[in-house]
Structures are given as structure tokens and as C-alpha cells.
Image: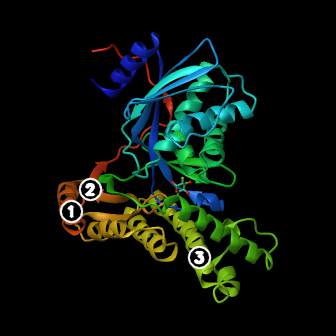
């Protein structure tokens, strides 16, 4: 039984009604890491790994959720939304934000599951938040636009779940367009779609299958380090608001010798923004090889200057770099585990998979999981519920 059919069937059996079905994808980011919360640019896209949600309204004010993959349930009421420190917070957080914003919503039932491997850094939480927001908008005829929904998802994650993430993940999942990357200005939220012109080249993810416990605390520390760099520089340049407004010259003049650690963090972000802009130009002119070199530069900065990589991710990039037909590779997302993103020539894919799998296992004892990505549309309704087979 395929996943949608299964979710529909669980929904019908549990709630004796037909659900609305939502598909909400995970994301990749080609370049521009840890730039979103510094008001910089990112270059993400929605992928063919998604959260699927079957949902329907209730006549009362109750909430009944089923996490199908985990075989767990949550039951509560709209009037009492408190964090549970479980998966339910991704749904409750969105509900809480809708209520806080004054949108009239009632109780609802939902069943969800997905194909995004958990802890792989492909944004399953943003995908789930978007799925819930999208569904509430439909169920209760709220007429919100997609950007409103993106902001509600981010606030759910920041204020209810307690992760101070930027806007990239929910934006990519909600706004994705098949075969296009999104060039997003995280300050203004201006965005453009750029068709992926990479004939004969695939986007390949290699999952390290590790998630180090540092991930949330170090993420918040990096944010704080960037903010402290900005505060220091504001004493010289009162007009700057974020690292987006800072140049390498400004950093070298005032920060390099004053605080070398903060300098390294800020320099990485400033350079990553520049890499992104050069990368967009390279892709526009069809120079994928130049883009690939920028990806290696991004990884080096993330590993040595921003210090958010880990031995497993460094190893995956190193192995990839030695394979024929690989144009670029780097760690992706917040870091400390999850996936690397690689650009690999189609005629080299088999050797790439074989070698990465073999060498990673030999050096770490761990299995990697390799996925060749397709770039898909963002969060949306899935046609009619499928017949139960
Ligand atoms: C995580 C966060 F959720 C994003 O907002 C972004 O900061 C990313 O790490 C790093 O680029 O995915």
C-alpha cells in the first residue's frame, strides 16, 4: 500500500470521514548556509521527499493527531496549547500561532507520515509545520497567502518549539517550484526562481546518518556570535543592521585582531554571501564547474571558520571530491550531521554511489544513504484521496 493510501485509510478508520490530503516537501540548499538569520541570501529548492498530511475538521474544539510512522497519538483541546517536547509541538506550534494572530480555527483531526528521513537535515519539521498551516488555511477558508504561512511556520518553530532558526527551510518547502532553485533575499523576502540548467548533472545527497547533540546549542551560539560581531562593528558603522551590510574590508580593519573567533564567524558569513552571488552568476552562465568550486569553498568555511561540520561530513566531502565526475560537494543545513549535497555527472553516478558507500562504511563503520534529488513544487493539496487497496 503506498503511503498516501495508507494515511487515507488510517484517517478513515480512525475518524470515519474522508480527509483533505497535503504534500509538503523537504528542501536542499545549493549554497548560502547560515546566511538566512544574518539577513543574507540563500539558494534552496523543494525536493521529492515530503511529509504527507491527511486532515479533516471536527465539530468541537478538540485536536487529535496521529503520527503514523511512529505509531503515536496526541489528543488535546484548542484552549490549552502547551509544548510537549514531542513531535506534536510542530503541529501545536502552528495552531498556537494561528490563534495568536486571531484567525478563526476549529478543532481538527489529522494523520501524517512521510518520506523525509528523520534527522537528515532535510527540514522535515518545516515541511510538517507548512503542511499544517496550509491545511488550516484550506479547512477554515482563511485566505492567507503563502508568505503569511511561511511566517507563521517560522514563528511556530521559534516561539513554540524553541529553535531560533531562520526562514530558509519553511520558505523553500512552501515556495518551491519544480526544476528551479529559489534565490531568496532573507531580509526583504524578495525572491526569484532560477531554472536549474545542469544538463547531465544530478544533485545527490549523501546522508551521514549522524546527528550530534550539539546541533541546537551550537546553532544558537553561532547566531549569538554573529550578533555580537554586528554590535561591535556598529560602534564604527552605526548604519549597519546585520552581517548582510558588512564587507571583508570592514571586518579586517576592526575585528580581525580584536576578537579572532568572532572575526572568523563573521568572515565566513560575509564570504558565504559573496560566494552565493558569484554562484548565481555562474549558474546563469551555465558554468556548473565554477559553481562546484564555490561549493567546496563553502564547505571549507563551514568546517574551519564557522565550525559547524563534523568528522563524518568532512569525510563524505573528501571522498566525493576524489571521485570522477563530481563537480562540487559540501555539508548542507545547520551542520553537526545530516547530509552533504553533491553535483555529480549522470554517467558517474553508479561509481559515485558505490565508492562513497564503500569508503564511508570502511572508515566510519556506518552506512550512508544516497539519494538523487528531483526538484519539486512546494506545499500543496494532493488530488483526490486515493482508493483504498
Ligand atoms: C537550519 C535552519 F533551520 C535554517 O534556518 C538555516 O539557518 C540553516 O540551518 C543553515 O543555513 O536548517
Which structural element holds mark 3? helix
Q: Which mark is residue 327?
A: none
Q: Earlier in the sequence, mark 3 or mark 1?
A: 3
Badges 1 and 2: C-beta atoms under 8 Å apart?
yes
Residue drawn 68% across the image and 87% down it: 258
Which structural element holds mark 1? helix
Q: CA distance from mark 3 to mark 1?
A: 34 Å
157 lies above or below 136: below
Single out the mark in the foreground, 3 or 1.
Answer: 1
Q: For mark 1, what is the residue?
A: 361
Which structural element holds mark 2? loop
Q: CA distance from mark 2 to mark 3?
A: 32 Å
* Quarter of the view holding residue 239: bottom right
Q: Residues within 10 Å of mark 1 (few under 14, many from 20)?
A: few
Residue 13 position in % (x across, y down)? 39, 13
* Residue 135 shows in the view: yes
Q: Earlier in the sequence, mark 2 or mark 3?
A: 3
Quick check: 138 left or right of 27?
Answer: right
Q: For mark 2, what is the residue?
A: 368
* Quarter of the view holding residue 96: top right
Residue drawn 34% across the image and 21% down it: 5
- Of residues 304 and 29, the one nearer the viewer is 304
Amino acid at each position: 500500500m503506498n503511503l498516501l493510501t495508507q494515511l487515507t485509510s488510517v484517517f478513515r478508520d480512525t475518524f470515519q470521514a474522508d480527509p483533505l490530503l497535503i504534500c509538503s516537501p523537504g528542501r536542499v540548499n545549493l549554497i548560502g548556509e547560515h546566511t538566512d538569520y544574518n539577513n543574507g541570501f540563500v539558494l534552496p529548492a523543494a525536493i521529492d521527499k515530503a511529509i504527507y498530511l491527511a486532515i479533516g475538521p471536527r465539530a468541537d474544539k478538540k485536536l487529535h493527531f496521529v503520527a503514523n510512522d511512529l505509531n503515536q497519538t496526541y489528543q488535546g483541546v484548542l484552549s490549552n496549547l502547551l509544548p510537549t517536547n514531542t513531535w506534536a509541538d510542530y503541529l501545536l506550534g502552528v495552531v498556537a500561532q494561528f490563534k495568536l494572530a486571531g484567525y478563526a480555527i476549529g478543532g481538527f483531526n489529522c494523520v501524517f507520515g512521510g518520506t523525509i528521513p528523520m534527522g537528515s537535515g532535510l527540514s522535515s519539521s518545516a515541511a510538517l509545520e507548512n503542511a499544517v498551516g496550509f491545511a488550516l488555511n484550506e479547512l477554515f477558508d482563511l485566505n492567507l497567502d503563502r508568505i503569511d504561512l511561511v511566517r507563521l511556520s517560522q514563528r511556530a518553530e521559534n516561539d513554540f518549539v524553541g529553535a531560533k532558526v531562520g526562514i530558509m527551510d519553511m520558505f523553500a518547502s512552501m515556495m518551491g517550484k519544480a526544476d528551479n532553485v529559489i534565490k531568496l533575499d532573507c531580509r526583504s523576502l524578495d525572491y526569484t526562481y532560477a531554472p536549474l540548467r545542469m544538463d547531465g548533472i544530478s544533485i545527490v545527497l549523501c546522508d551521514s546518518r549522524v546527528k550530534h547533540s550539539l546541533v541546537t546549542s551550537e546553532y544558537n551560539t553561532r547566531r549569538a556570535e554573529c550578533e555580537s560581531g554586528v554590535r561591535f562593528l556598529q560602534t564604527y558603522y552605526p548604519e549597519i543592521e546585520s552581517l548582510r551590510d558588512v564587507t571583508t574590508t570592514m571586518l579586517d580593519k576592526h575585528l580581525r585582531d580584536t576578537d579572532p573567533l568572532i572575526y572568523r564567524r563573521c568572515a565566513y558569513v560575509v564570504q558565504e554571501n559573496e560566494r552565493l552571488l558569484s554562484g548565481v552568476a555562474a549558474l546563469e552562465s551555465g558554468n556548473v564547474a565554477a559553481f562546484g568550486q564555490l561549493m567546496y569553498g563553502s564547505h571549507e568555511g563551514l568546517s574551519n571558520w564557522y565550525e559547524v561540520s563534523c568528522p563524518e561530513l568532512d569525510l563524505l566531502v573528501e571522498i566525493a571530491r576524489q571521485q570522477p565526475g563530481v563537480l562540487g560537494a559540501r555539508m548542507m543545513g545547520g551542520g553537526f550531521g545530516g547530509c552533504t549535497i553533491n553535483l555529480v555527472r549522470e554517467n558517474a553516478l553508479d561509481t559515485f554511489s558505490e565508492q562513497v558507500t564503500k569508503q564511508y562504511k570502511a572508515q566510519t563503520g556506518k552506512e550512508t544513504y544516497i539519494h538523487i534529488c528531483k526538484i519539486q513544487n512546494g506545499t500543496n493539496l494532493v488530488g483526490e484521496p486515493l482508493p483504498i487497496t
